[in-house]
Image (tube, rainbow, N blue to C red):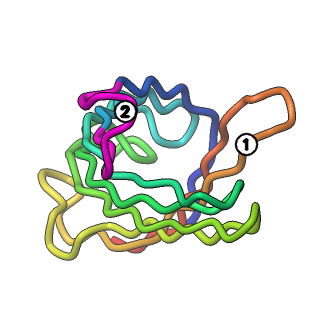
Amino acid sequence: MTASGPFEVKLASLTAPDALPGRMSIDKQFHGDLEATSKGEMLMAAAAVKGSAGYVAIERVEGTLHGRAGSFLLQHNATMARGAGELNIIVIPDSGTGELSGLSGKMMINIAPDGAHMYEFEYEL
């Protein structure tokens, strides 16, 4: 199955600006097929070469997915090499609760030129 829609994200630094790795809090609001909120933390580092960086993150998503209520955990792993990015976001196995028990899947994120964020979530229950 596929779920999609927009989301808003707020990131807040939890470390000094020059700390490596940097640590940030994640606060998201998903809309569309996934009506949910999420909280999480990210570790990130940028290289001396412009456009090269990486991050890892874990977030807990709670709400409804196509009307099914529960929560699940997402694991992020991303790298950028001189502006070319690779992003992998997966559901942590066996992390689904409630009506989302048994959930597995992968989420993709698209950011429009105007900064709007959209998700596409391919999943199985």
Residue 71 vertical position relative to residue 9 in the rendered view, above or below: below
> In the rendered structure, does residue 20 fall within the stretch colored magenta?
yes
**Which quarter of the figure has residue 114?**
top right
- In the shown orientation, is residue 63 left or right of residue 31? left
Please identify the quadrant where the C terminus is shown: bottom left
Secondary structure at badge 2 equals strand
Who's the residue at 26% across and 34% down the image?
A: 39
Q: Amino acid at mark 1?
A: Ile
Magenta region, residue range: 13-23
Indicate which disc residue 36 carries.
2
Disc 1: CA contacts within 10 A as few (<14), some (14-19) or many (>=20): few
Indicate which disc residue 86 carries.
none
Residue 95 vertical position relative to residue 5 in the rendered view, above or below: below
- In the shown orientation, is residue 70 left or right of residue 103? left
> In the rendered structure, does residue 106 fall within the stretch colored magenta?
no
Residue 90 vertical position relative to residue 108 in the rendered view, above or below: below
Residue matched to label 1: 111
Who's the residue at 26% across and 54% down the image?
A: 58
**Which quarter of the figure has residue 67?**
top left
Q: Position of residue 37 (x, y in %)?
A: 33, 30
Q: Position of residue 53 (x, y in %)?
A: 55, 60
The span from disc 1 to disc 2 (Cα, nearest Å) is 19 Å
